[in-house]
Amino acid sequence: MLEQVVSTGIVTSYFNKLKENLAVDVAIVGGGPSGLIAAYYLAKKGLRVALYERKLAPGGGMWGGAMMFNEIVIQKDALHILDELKVTYKHYEGDYYTLDSVHATAALIYHATQAGATIFNCTTIEDVVFQNDRVSGVVVNWAPVAREHMHVDPLVVMAKAVLDGTGHDCDIVRTVERKNSIVLNTPSGKVMGERSLSIDEAERTTVENTKMVYPGLYVSGMASNGVSGGFRMGPIFGGMLLSGEKVAKLIAEDIKKL
């Protein structure tokens, strides 16, 4: 019967995908623009990459543009990434360009998966694996389980590197710091929290603060500023894309040393 064929096909395919990603090179938490770009570049290098997004659709705040005006701004420094992904943009003024946020976000998702990254949506990361003073994986559950505060045990995915791309909340680094009494690679040794909006400063520090903050644990995008006390930037996304590009290079280089 067709009904059984459809259900069996979905269940079989999904569980094959899940089994293939129980041990990965890189686990990316958060499907915003920096996470998607990191997934794209890491997968292009031949690494096994799994990206976890708690919402139905990856993309983070990029979908909505500014106050649901679905246009965003990007600076000249990041145009090479858009050109590589064949994303259309228009010159606006000086070194700044505008682009359709829906078109851009869809392109990031498409190219990340086309490069070989696997995206698990409706999935939350509630903890990490912490072994020998190193972050060594993620603790995975369904997003509705967390939302409804259900007492359902998770599964574990082992990873050589974990990227916190959870945006303003920087959930993963906060969890690791709180549970393990560690000293982070930040000016204070702790999660410092995000500062108010300052676009020039935020675009610069988003990239500067993209780094490994503890062995096996990296930050990108707004999580990088949230962890190191940087500013928020609003609906300009060049720094986010450059952050994803930078962290992919850092992770790939570090994995080679393991």
Image (spheres, helix red, strand yellow):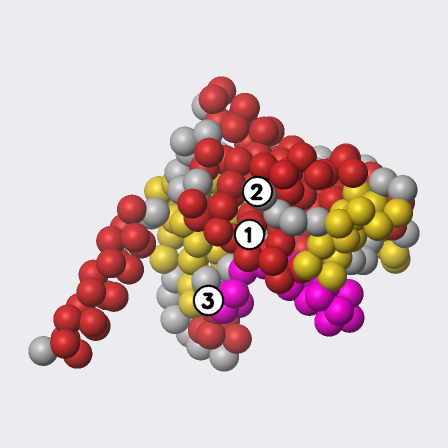
**Circle 2 sits in a helix, a strand or a loop, which is it?**
loop
Depth check, mark 1 against mark 3: the one in front is 1
Whichever of callouts 1 and 3 sits on the residue coming sooner in the sequence is: 1
Left or right position of 154 against 72: left
**Mark 3 secondary-structure assignment:** loop
In the rendered image, residue 250 lying in the magenta stretch gets the answer no
Q: Which badge, 3 or 2, comes first in the chain's sequence? A: 2
Task: Tell me the amino acid under the disc marked 2.
Answer: Leu
Q: Nearer the viewer, mark 3 or mark 2?
A: 2
Location of mark 3 (residue): 122
**Residue at the spot of label 2:** 85
Q: Position of residue 190 (x, y in %)?
A: 74, 45
Labels 3 and 2 touching (C-beta < 8 A): no
Residue 82 x/y as whole percent: 64, 42
Give the residue type that dot 3 points to.
Cys
Which class describes the residues within 10 Å of circle 1: few (<14), some (14-19), or many (20+)? some
Asked if labels 1 and 2 touch by Cβ distance under 8 angstroms, the answer is yes
Check the image and report above or below for 9 versus 73. below
Cα distance between the residues tagged 2 and 1: 7 Å
The residue under the point 67% across, 55% down is 167
**Residue 107 appears in view:** yes
Closer to the N terminus: mark 2 or mark 1? 2
| Vertical comparison of 102 with 163: above or below | below
Residue carrying label 1: 107
Specify the label residue 17 is tagged with.
none
Q: Residue furthest top?
A: 257
Q: Position of residue 245 (x, y in %)?
A: 62, 36
Q: CA distance from mark 3 to mark 2?
A: 26 Å
Question: Observer-nearest residue: 15 or 138?
Answer: 15
Q: Residue at x 51, y 41 (%)?
A: 40
Residue 56 inside the magenta-drawn segment: yes
Q: Which residues are magenta?
A: 54-70
